[in-house]
Amino acid sequence: MRGTGTRFLIVGLLALLMFIPLWFVSAIIDDRTRLSEQTIREVGEEWGGSQLLSGPVLILPVEGPVQVPETVEVNDPATGQLRAETRMVTEIRAMAPVILLPETFELTLETESDIRSRGIFDVPVYGAEARIAFDFDTDAASGQLRPGERILWDAASLRVTVTANRALRGNAELLADGRAIPLEPRADGQPGIAAALGDPREIGAYDLTLGFNGAAELSATPMGRTSRVTITSDWPHPSFFGAFLPDDSEISDAGFSATWTIPHLARPLPQAARSDTDLTARATSAFGVRYFQPNDFYQKAWRAARYGILFIALTFLTVLLIEGRTGKPTHPVQYILIGLAQSVFVLLMVSYAEQIGFGAAYALSAGATTALLTLFGAVGLKLGRRTLVLAAMLGIIYAVLYLILRSADYALLAGSTLAFFALALTMIATRNEDWYGPATAGPRRPWFGKPKEPQNGEPEGTPPPPA
């Protein structure tokens, strides 16, 4: 029989060769993942897409004097002829409006999640209701005027920017001191709503209720001098993002609740300005929550393919150690078949998970693979009672893999611990091995193939000459 060291090296090379089928499996999983993401994106966009609320802001039109050139005909006293003369005249024209942000801004967002299906894919979406209580300090507007300018108070309007008007559903109501004010789409072609207020100096408090659909993300901008935002939902897996993280949050299987309190000094937005700061607010100050799907079965399958080489190597090692005691070496082709079976396990898992869910798919795929390899060990490898060792090792491998896939946070810990213990047990099990081959008499038996016959009349059992 060839030296144990040589057999270990060859089995190690065969294990590395298994990177090839695992790479193809990973490519298939990537294709399915992209298809899933495309479906989620399409359905989400049809439902409303990611939603970002920005506003409300108070728009105060301004008019003022402007010097403009005017051409007139005058009589030239020297010639007595009419000639054209340009002079500067003053006209009253529309100027850049004054834009005020709220003083107090309390936004409450309540969402209820739902699942929409397309084919075999489930897409999480939500319906939301926003309630905003706010007010404005109209006295701050006078500080933005230049000499000769005046505010057209009766033409004041309120504006709220949304991601897309097609997402608006349900309630849409604006109350000014309890008086309902009609809402209309923005007249400038941008997504959002607007309301003609009349003179806002007589209004003390506003309340806006807005219903809308969305998917994937929900965010807002802190528009007030003091902004307090609360988001509650029945979605159990929030992922907070943006310029600000919540001051306080509660997350459970029944949903989550999160609260932000943001002073105006924390955002680069003036309370009163002559330019529109909406783009700046959306780009630098937006925050919110993603409706995260943790560790879905495509992620699990991809990670299973990445960990696959470890578990294939452990199975090869188990077979190598137990067949070494039987005197019946395993052929390299048999090792390749074992590795291919464990590579196909990942495909089985993801294909069944699309139909029956991850838990049942994993149990079915792992059970089928374990049964197949155990039967192969008993019938194909002729391991006898040592087949039970192979079955037990496969059971441990797939149990540990399940734990790794269920918890992404502890995947590295579990995988590295398993690899360490496998290496330690191998070192213990092979502590008395003669890595250069046995020195006992007898015909040389190759790792695979027929034993070498004695030559030149050597009696059977003659040890080989020393190297």
Image (cartoon, rainbow, N blue to C red):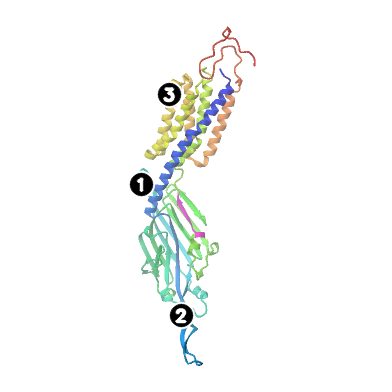
- Measuring 35% from the left and 46% from the top, which residue is drawn there? 118
* Residue at figure coordinates x 42%, y 67% from the top left: 159
Question: Can you tell which mark lies on residue 375?
Answer: 3
User: Which of the two discs, 3 and 2, labels the residue nearer the N terminus?
Assistant: 2
Mark 1 = which residue?
A: 117
Disc 2 marks a residue whose amino acid type is Ile
Q: What span is in magenta?
A: 283-291
Nearer to us of marks 3 and 2 is: 2
Q: Disc 3 to disc 2, how far (Cα)?
A: 94 Å
What's the distance in space between the residues labelled 2 and 1, CA to CA? 59 Å
Task: State the SS at label 1.
Answer: strand
Classify mark 2: helix, strand or loop: strand
Image location of residue 250, percent across then percent down = 47, 51
State the residue position of label 2: 92
Q: How many marks?
A: 3
Image vertical order of residue 27 relative to residue 42, above or below:
above
Q: Quadrant of residue 195?
A: bottom left
- Tell me the amino acid under the disc marked 1: Ser
Please report whichever mark, 2 or 1, sits nearer to the chain's N-terminal start: 2
In the figure, 66 relative to 357: above or below?
below
How far across and down, in percent of the image, does residue 340 sit? Answer: 46, 30
* Structural crowding at the residue carrying mark 3, measured as other residues with C-alpha within 10 Å and reported as few (<14), some (14–19) or many (≥20): some
Determine the residue positioned at 52% across, 65% down.
269
The residue lying toward the viewer, choosing from 414 and 8, is 8
Q: Tell me the SS state at disc 3.
A: helix
Q: Does 318 sit left or right of 157 as displayed? A: right
